[in-house]
Image (cartoon, rainbow, N blue to C red):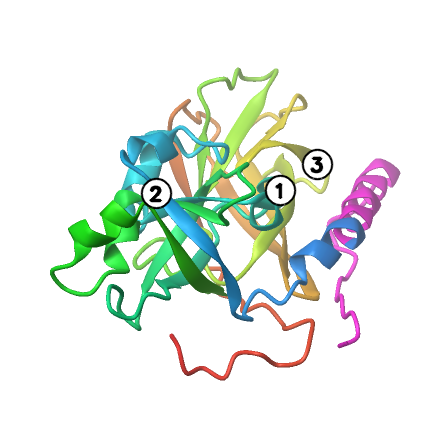
């Protein structure tokens, strides 16, 4: 078993006792969440998968992406079991999946993105029909749909959103200055965001946000003026703060999507013996 390695430095901007306490709280939270995040995601897992007949069933899911989910990964989406969903930290994670019926399915499989929670114990994924069909050999997409449920193997892979930086969307429930809710979009790499802080641009008075559900975070303590964010990102046994210095303008709007200017591309460290020889990508 590899040793746990966490690298954090006290941010220079922490100038008050309350700010330091908030930072310590966030760090303690990481020590609680990292063991689940450090699972051997790149190892090959065996399970079963089924599908939703309508992709819209996944767009209203537990990650909170709403109709935006339909545009992710060409609609190749999935609801995943709690061990993958990770109380919302697994939202937006990407997996390579292939079915094990060699006559019906291709060796390459397909890639999907997690947008919902699957509470069933019989399958690890409930996929969109588009993702389910993408596992089939050419001309056999209807045949795999007839199966309803298939044996699969899968592993986690890094997410790539070409031309997209990490972004936040201001949710409709937000009410300046009493409440702010944001949704995290286009999270790349093989990572999980386990904490978010917000502060007025130019201020060191950071205030932590709470995960409301899925990819949605909120706070009832909304700083005035333009806002900056910092994200606590884990990748296997490693974690770090990522700082977006200016994200929301002073006149931020409900429903607006704001570019952080950040690219997250970290690859998770394996927490067990190396298990990915790179033969299946």
Q: Is residue 55 left or right of residue 15?
A: left
The image shows residue 30 at horizontal and vertical percentages of 75, 51
* SS of the residue under disc 3: strand
The image quadrant where one finds the C terminus is: bottom left
Image depth: mark 3 or mark 1 in front: 3
Q: CA distance from mark 2 to mark 3?
A: 37 Å
Residue drawn at x 42%, y 22% is 254
Q: How many marks?
A: 3
Tag 2 and tag 3, C-beta contact below 8 Å: no
Image depth: mark 2 or mark 1 in front: 2
Chain part drawn in magenta: 1-30
Identify the disc placed on residue 208: 3
The image shows residue 262 at horizontal and vertical percentages of 47, 55
Label 2 or label 3, whichever comes before in sequence order: 2
Residue drawn at x 77%, y 62% is 9
Q: CA distance from mark 3 to mark 1?
A: 16 Å
The image shows residue 35 at horizontal and vertical percentages of 74, 58
Label 3 or label 1, whichever comes before in sequence order: 1
Q: Is residue 190 above or below residue 208?
A: below
Residue labelled with disc 1: 202
Q: Residue furthest right?
A: 17
| Residue 262 appears anywhere in the view | no
Q: Is residue 121 left or right of residue 59?
A: right
Residue labelled with disc 2: 51
Q: Residues within 10 Å of mark 2 (few under 14, many from 20)?
A: many
Foreground of the two, 19 or 254 = 254
Residue drawn at x 76%, y 66% is 6
Foreground of the two, 122 or 209 = 122
């Amino acid at each position: 078993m590899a040793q746990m390695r966490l690298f954090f430095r006290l941010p220079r901007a922490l100038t008050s006792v309350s700010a330091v306490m908030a930072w310590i709280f966030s760090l303690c939270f990481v020590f609680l969440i990292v063991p689940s995040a450090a699972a051997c995601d790149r190892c090959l897992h065996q399970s079963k998968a089924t599908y939703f007949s309508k992709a819209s069933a996944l767009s209203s899911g537990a990650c909170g992406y709403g109709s935006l989910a339909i545009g992710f990964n060409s609609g190749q989406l999935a609801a995943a079991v709690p061990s993958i969903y990770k109380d919302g930290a697994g939202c937006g994670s990407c997996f390579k999946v292939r079915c094990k019926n060699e006559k019906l399915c291709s060796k390459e499989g397909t890639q999907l993105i997690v947008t919902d929670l699957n509470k069933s114990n019989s399958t690890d994924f409930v996929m969109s029909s588009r993702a389910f069909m993408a596992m089939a050999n050419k001309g056999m997409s209807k045949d795999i749909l007839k199966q309803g449920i298939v044996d699969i193997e899968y592993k986690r892979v890094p997410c790539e959103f070409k031309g997209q930086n990490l972004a936040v969307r201001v949710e409709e429930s937000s009410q300046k200055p009493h409440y702010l809710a944001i949704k995290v979009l286009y999270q790349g790499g093989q990572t999980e965001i386990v904490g978010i802080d917000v502060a007025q641009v130019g201020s060191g008075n950071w205030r932590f946000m709470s995960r409301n559900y899925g990819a949605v975070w909120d706070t009832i303590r909304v700083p005035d003026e333009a806002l900056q964010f910092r994200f606590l990102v884990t990748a296997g046994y490693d974690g770090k703060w990522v700082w977006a210095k200016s994200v929301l303008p002073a006149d931020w709007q409900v429903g607006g999507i704001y570019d952080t200017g950040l690219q997250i591309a970290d690859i998770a460290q394996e927490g067990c013996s190396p298990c990915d020889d790179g033969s299946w990508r």
